Amino acid sequence: MAEPVEEKKYITEEEYYRIDDRSEEKLIFYRGDKFVSYRKIKSLKNYILVSQYAIHIEHFYKNDRGQWVLEEKEDLGDVLQLKALDCELPVKSVYRRIDFRIDGY
């Protein structure tokens, strides 16, 4: 009988931002169980999901009341406001090397 494999811890207790690229197949997992576990990290204030297949970024952030808020970006001209880092992230910079066109479509 095989020994159970211990799951590796891939997040830290001091994490402030978390960015994951999401596949459509794992979207439910990223928004569900994974996000539930991330929300238990007190220092985490931002969780960003970046689609691999379309221009679509989901930015979950914790507001001043401790509630999680969703902000979505779906246009290359959009800009994410990352207040905790005091910076802006243009959506076009996230997708700068991606060509979504598929031959024949």
Image (cartoon, rainbow, N blue to C red):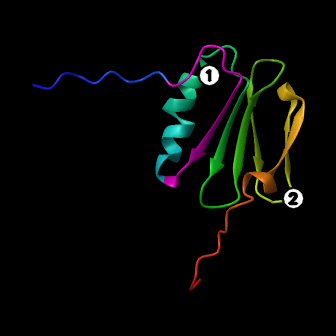
Magenta-tinted stretch: 10-24
Q: Residue 77 in the image: x percent, y percent?
A: 87, 58
Residue that badge 2 annotates: 77
**In front: label 1 or label 2:** 2
Q: Residue at x 81, y 60 (%)?
A: 76
Quarter where residue 44 is shown = top right
Q: Is residue 56 left or right of residue 103?
A: right
Question: Which quadrant is the N terminus positioned in?
Answer: top left
Q: Secondary structure at mark 1?
A: helix
**Residue positioned 71% across, 59% down in the render:** 55
Q: Amino acid at mark 1?
A: Arg
Q: Is residue 53 magenta?
A: no
Q: Which residue is mark 1?
A: 39
Q: Is residue 42 above or below residue 71?
A: above
Give SS at disc 2.
loop
Q: Quadrant of the C terminus?
A: bottom right
Residue drawn at point x = 52 percent, y = 35 percent:
32
Look at label 2 and name its amino acid: Gly
Q: Tell me: residue 55, above or below residue 35.
A: below
